[in-house]
């Protein structure tokens, strides 16, 4: 299991905005074949990944951008999707940014 610590910063989000963030995280994860669950973590840990399940602490500061993206990377690595993502990213950099990626 990967347990990831993050930095904490107040956001001032309402409970409804936080719920919408979790719903968005679940929708994004589902597209990649993973599941999101809310789970209280150890002090300072905002998320974890194990066997296709991404756990996000309900108190996470930025559940989608900071925690989901990080944990989704672990899922992509273990599911074989990471090489496809990496290839697409390199192609984007080469074509759209004119960079030499070789």
Image (cartoon, helix red, strand yellow):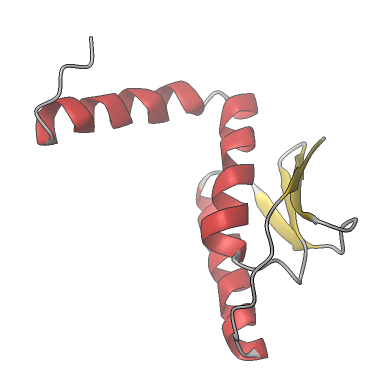
Please name the residue shown 62% across and 89% down the image.
16
Farthest residue to the top: give it.
Answer: 102
Please name the residue shown 57% across and 79% down the image.
20
Residue 87 seen in the current view: yes
Describe residue 9's horizontal placement relative to residue 69 as left or right: right
Please name the residue shown 65% across and 26% down the image.
78
Between residue 102 and residue 25, name the one nearer to us: 102
Please name the residue shown 64% across and 44% down the image.
71
Residue 11 appears at what percent x and percent y? 59, 79
User: Which quarter of the figure is the N terminus placed in?
Assistant: top right
The picture quadrant where one finds residue 89 is top left
Residue 14 appears at what percent x and percent y? 62, 90
Residue 30 seen in the current view: no
Residue 38 appears at what percent x and percent y? 78, 65
The picture quadrant where one finds residue 98 is top left
The picture quadrant where one finds residue 25 is bottom right
User: Which quarter of the figure is the C terminus placed in?
Assistant: top left
The answer to whether residue 55 is above or below residue 1 is below
Describe residue 56's horizontal placement relative to residue 34 as left or right: right
The answer to whether residue 13 is above or below residue 21 is below
Q: How many marks?
A: 0
């Amino acid at each position: 299991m990967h347990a990831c610590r993050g930095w904490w910063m107040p956001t001032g989000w309402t409970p409804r905005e936080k719920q919408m963030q979790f719903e968005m995280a679940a929708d994004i994860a589902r597209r990649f074949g993973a599941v999101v669950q809310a789970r209280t973590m150890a002090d300072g840990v905002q998320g974890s990944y194990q066997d296709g399940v991404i756990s996000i602490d309900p108190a996470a500061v930025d559940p989608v951008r900071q925690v989901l993206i990080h944990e989704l990377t672990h899922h992509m690595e273990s599911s074989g999707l990471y090489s496809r993502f990496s290839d697409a990213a390199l192609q984007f950099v080469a074509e759209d940014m004119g960079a030499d990626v070789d």
